[in-house]
Amino acid sequence: MKIIEARVIVTSPGRNFVTLKLTTDEGLVGLGDATLNGRELAVASYLTDHVCPLLIGRDAGRIEDTWNYLYKGAYWRRGPVTMTSIAAVDVALWDLKGKAAALPVYQLLGGRCRDAATVYGHANGETVDEAVEQVGAYLRAGYRAVRVQAGVPGVAGIYGVGGHGQPYEPAVAGLPPETVWDTAAYLRHIPDLFAAVRDKYGFDFHLLHDVHHRLTPIEAARLGRDLEPYRLFWMEDPVPAELQEGFRLIRGHTTTPIAVGEVFNAVWDCRQLISEQLIDFVRTPVSHGGGITHLRRILGLAELYHVRSGFHGATDLSPVCLAAALHVDVSIPNFGLQEYMAHSAETDEVFPHSYRFEDGALLAGEEPGLGVDIDEEAAARYPYRAAYLPVNRLRDGTVHSW
Ligand code: CS2
Ligand code: MG
């Protein structure tokens, strides 16, 4: 099964997506998500100019060999652009292998450990009341896990709040918007948010919160301790994670579980976090973590240390990534939870797929491969437009993690 065509498709149905499409001499098509929010064209060029020419004529069945060919053969290793590019190739090859074997990819990964992947939705609101209302809407829709983000009085444009319950899409057309951050105001306000949610709905469902890298370890320790009465399923990205040993300080102060890793792209980014049990869930998505091949290595290491999966699943990861994630979700023993932000109708039009939401979970498709396609005519109707993630600053103007 030889690769005869390798093309990159950039489309923007409401937000930018980059997709790698491989075609074999037997007419099979494999897809990989190559979207890196705010840096899309860097990956499109890495693939188009440096990877696709190398794939033509290669045996599509040699997934592990191709992974190492692209990882070690580049000499310059790791990083989000390289690993997103390798991930796109890897996922497309797994898609092809499933189609060639007439099996859904999860069957190639060892079969099911569970029928479906429990998901969490995103409740948000400018105010606590608005956010609490949104949580109720997700519970009524059948979700058993809900992430909650809310505005903080005096802090405009905070991460994760879409404005009056709208889904939150962080990438903005044009130059990066700038937002202001106030750690003290945030730390004062967030425990009240979760007290209000638990007061209204009780404890019979999972609650999550995304700190989004914005605290120091001792501030994260304080927040984790303040949230303990509300029994969070996880506190996400409490601090920037370059300093992996920095999590020892958080771990020493609080039992609130920690989820990290959506900005990681290789096992080396989390090896210490996992082997020292400094985290409870690893979030690295299929599309940024080197694909299915590398992600299974990360989850295999994680299993040894009681760490479970909690894959990133925001709307800037395309349905191709979500479809691939679900095949991994249902086939690993240490599954934790899958993030699920439903894509827009335009996005679903460009990427028809068979996964579906049912009773608080997503079910992967049963057809051969990943169960997702790209409608290139529809994709052509949505041209690329430059968009950036916000830049965050403290009140004194210091650039801060967003
Ligand atoms: C967030 C993301 O979903 C999450 O947990 O951290 O919304 C993140 O901000 C975006 O994916 C960035 O592109
Ligand atoms: Mg996050």
Image: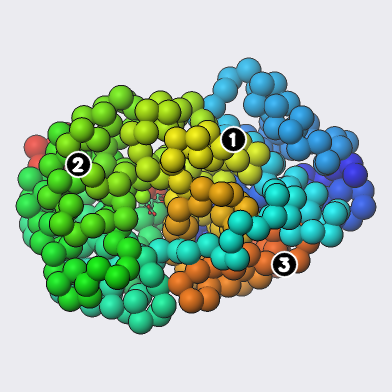
- Label 2's element? loop
Q: Which residue position is annotated with label 2?
A: 254
Circle 3: residue type: Glu
The answer to which of 45 and 19 lies nearer the viewer is 19
**Cα distance between the residues tagged 2 and 3:** 42 Å
Identify whether 364 is placed above or below 295: below
Circle 1: residue type: Arg
Scheme of colours in the image: rainbow
- Label 3's element? loop
Q: Earlier in the sequence, mark 1 or mark 2?
A: 2
Foreground: disc 2 or disc 3: 2
Residue at 79% of width from left, 59% of height from top? 103
Residue 308 visible in the displayed image: yes
Where residue 52 sits: x, y (%)?
74, 37
Position of 128 with respect to 317 (left or right) is left
Identify whether 255 is placed above or below 145: above
Looking at this view, name the residue that lies furthest to the right.
26
Where residue 157 sits: x, y (%)?
21, 57
Where residue 75 sits: x, y (%)?
63, 17
Identify whether 177 is placed above or below 87: below
Residue 324 visible in the displayed image: no
The circle on residue 297 is 1
